[in-house]
Image (cartoon, helix red, strand yellow):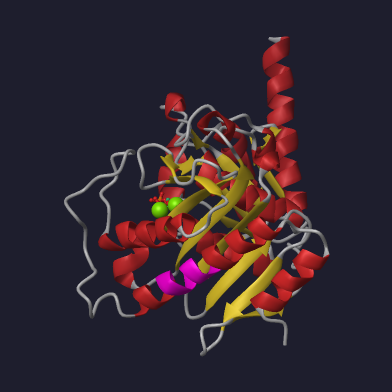
Amino acid sequence: MTTFETFLEGQKQAGLDDDLIAVLREVAEATRKISDTLKTSSLEGLTGATEETNVQGETQKPLDILSNDILLDACRALPSVSFAVSEELDAEVAIHADGRYAVIFDPLDGSSNLDVNVTVGTIFSVIEAKTAADILKSGRHQLVAGYAAYGPQTTLVLTTGKGVQIFTLNGEGTYVLTTADAKIAPEAKEFAINAARRASWDDVVAAYIEEAIDTGHNMRWVGSMVADTHRIFNRGGVFLYPADRNKPASGGRLRLLYEANPIGLLVEAAGGEAIIGETKILDLEPTGLHQRVPVIFGSKAEVDKLSAAYSARKLEAAAE
Ligand SMILES: O=P(O)(O)OC[C@H]1O[C@](O)(COP(=O)(O)O)[C@@H](O)[C@@H]1O
Ligand SMILES: [Mg+2]
Ligand SMILES: [Mg+2]
C-alpha cells in the first residue's frame, strides 16, 4: 500500500523541495478536513446561502467560507507560503513576508450542488511568488496542481509536473494511492457542456457539438467542474465552457488562476489537452486574479479537433 506520505517520501528522494512537500502535506490535510466537514454539514446547519457575496458577485455558501478558512489556516501554518489567492478573497492575502510559495485555490468548486448532495471539490495549485506581482504568471509556472473530489469517495488527484497520481481517502483518514500515473484516454465519445447556453456558443463549439451528437456521442453535465474532470480522468471525453458570444468581454464562466490553470496542468500531465481557442490554457498570461476564460479540455484527439478549428477560423479572419 502506498500512502500519500510514502508518495511524498518518494518525491523528496526525487528532489522535490522540502518546503513544497510540506505545502502538499498541509493542503492534503486541509482537503481531509473539508471532506469531514461536508459529510455532516446538514446536521450542523451548514446549508443554504449566507448574506455575503464574493468579489465576483456570487452569493457565498457557509461551506464556501468554511473551506476557504480551512485552506487559509493551512497556509498560515506553512512558513514557506508567501501568499494565498482564493475565489472567495477579493485580493491576494499576504501570509509570511519571507515565504516563497503562493497557494492558489478554489476552496469549493461546484458549490451550487452542495444542497443536492452531488460531488463538489477543491482545486489548488502552487507557484513560486516572493512578491504579489509574481502571482500573475502563466500556468506553465505551476509547480504542483491538484483537486480533491468529494463524492461517494474522497479522491485526491495530484501532479508535481510529470504524471498524475490518484489517492483515495480510507476509513482512517489516510490518502492511499489507487491509480498511479493516470492517463486520459486519447479518444472518447462523450462531452460535457451546459447545453442551455447553446445560443451563446461560438461557431467552433456549436459545430463540434452538432457533429458530436450526429456521430453518437453521449452527454454528461454535473455542474461541478471537478466532478466532470474526474469523469474525464476515468473514461475520457471533453469539457467545454465557452465564452458567451454576446458578452465577449466577460471572458467566460471559469476562472483562469484557480480553475482553468490547475486543471490544465493535470490534464496535460495525463496526456490530454487544455485550450482557450487556439492557445493552450497553460500559455495564457493572466491579467487579473479573478480573470475568467473560456475553457476546453480532455481527450487529446477531441480537443485537437477543436483547436484546429479555432486556428482555421483565425486564418480565415486574417484573410478577410
Ligand atoms: O451554472 P453552470 O453553467 O452549470 O456552471 C457550472 C460551473 O460553474 C462552477 O460551479 C464554478 O465554480 P464555483 O462553484 O467554484 O463558483 C463549475 O464548477 C461548473 O462547471
Ligand atoms: Mg469553481
Ligand atoms: Mg468555488
Q: Relative to 23, is 250 above or below?
A: above
Q: Is residue 110 visible?
A: no
Residue toward you, 6 or 311: 6
Please identify the quarter of the rendering in which residue 107 is found.
Answer: bottom left
Residue 184 point in image, percent of width and height: 73, 62
Instruction: Tell which residue pokes out farthest to the top in this image.
Output: 320
Residue toward you, 162 or 100: 100
Q: In the shown orientation, is residue 22 left or right of residue 258?
A: right
Mainly helix, strand or loop, the magenta region?
Answer: helix
Residue toward you, 213 or 140: 140
Please identify the quarter of the rendering in which residue 113 is found.
Answer: bottom left
Q: Relative to 233, is 210 above or below?
A: above
Residue toward you, 83 or 141: 83
Query: For the point 28% across and 39% down, which residue is it?
Result: 57
Query: For the point 71% across and 61% down, which residue is it?
Result: 188
Q: Which residues are magenta?
A: 28-34
Instruction: Tell which residue pokes out farthest to the left in this image.
Output: 51
Residue 100 point in image, percent of width and height: 60, 43
Query: For the point 25% across and 45% down, which residue is it?
Result: 53
Figure quadrant of the C terminus: top right
